[in-house]
Amino acid sequence: MTDTHRPLVIKTTSGLDRPETANQAFTVAAAAVAAGAEVSLWLAGEASWFAVPGRAAELELEHAAPLPDLLDAVLAAGTVTLCTQCAARREIGPDDVLPGVRVAGAPVFVEEILRPGAQALMY
């Protein structure tokens, strides 16, 4: 990360129920990673399902980059976190998620957004 980039924390609760909003969150996260920013993408609510193998491919949106490609880009150079409570409500366990996805709760999210210079975005 260069000194000109501040940490970016993106949280999305949008899933297949809101495909454009979900895709926008992933697009912004992948673009920020490509720009060299430190990116943390949080999956909560219906977006929790995207942490499960194969589920990102279920979102198809015309004129948009495929969600699995965007997710792979963020996993390769950033952090992807699945909300603990959201996962539990959907019976998604730590062994059910893609390699590289961590499961963490509100205290970790708050720690990230309170870091000096951090910018938080919600989708």
Image: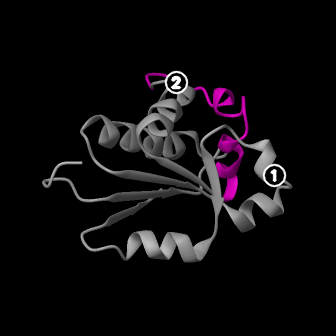
| Residue 29: numbered disc | none
Quadrant of residue 81 within the rendered picture: bottom right
Q: Is residue 49 magenta?
A: yes
* Residue drawn at (45%, 32%) of the image: 73
- Identify which residue is drawn at 50% across, 25% down: 69
Amino acid type shown at disc 1: Ile
The crowding category of the residue bearing disc 2, from other C-alpha atoms within 10 Å (few below 14, some 14 to 19, many at least 20), is some
Q: Is residue 84 left or right of residue 89?
A: left
> Which mark is nearer the camera, 2 or 1?
1
**Left-right relation of 115 to 19:** left
Whether residue 9 is visible here, answered yes or no, is yes
Is residue 16 visible in the rendered image? The answer is: no
Q: Amino acid at mark 2?
A: Pro
Q: Residue at x 27, y 74 (%)?
A: 116
Q: Residue 26, how many percent across, how many down?
A: 47, 41
Element under disc 1: loop
Does dot 2 land on a helix, a strand or a loop? loop
Q: Which mark is residue 66?
A: 2
Residue count near mark 1 (Cα–Cα under 10 Å), binned few <14, some 14–19, many ≥20? some
Q: CA distance from mark 2 to mark 1?
A: 23 Å
Give the number of callouts. Answer: 2
Q: Is residue 45 left or right of residue 1?
A: right
Residue 89 vertical placement versus 20 (above, below):
below
Residue occupied by mark 1: 92
Quadrant of residue 6 within the rendered picture? bottom left
Residue name at image x 33 percent, y 51 percent: 38
Residues rendered magenta in the picture: 45-64
**2 or 1: tag closer to the N-terminus:** 2
In the image, farthest residue toward the left: 4
User: Residue 16, percent across and down?
Assistant: 66, 41
Magenta highlight on residue 46: yes
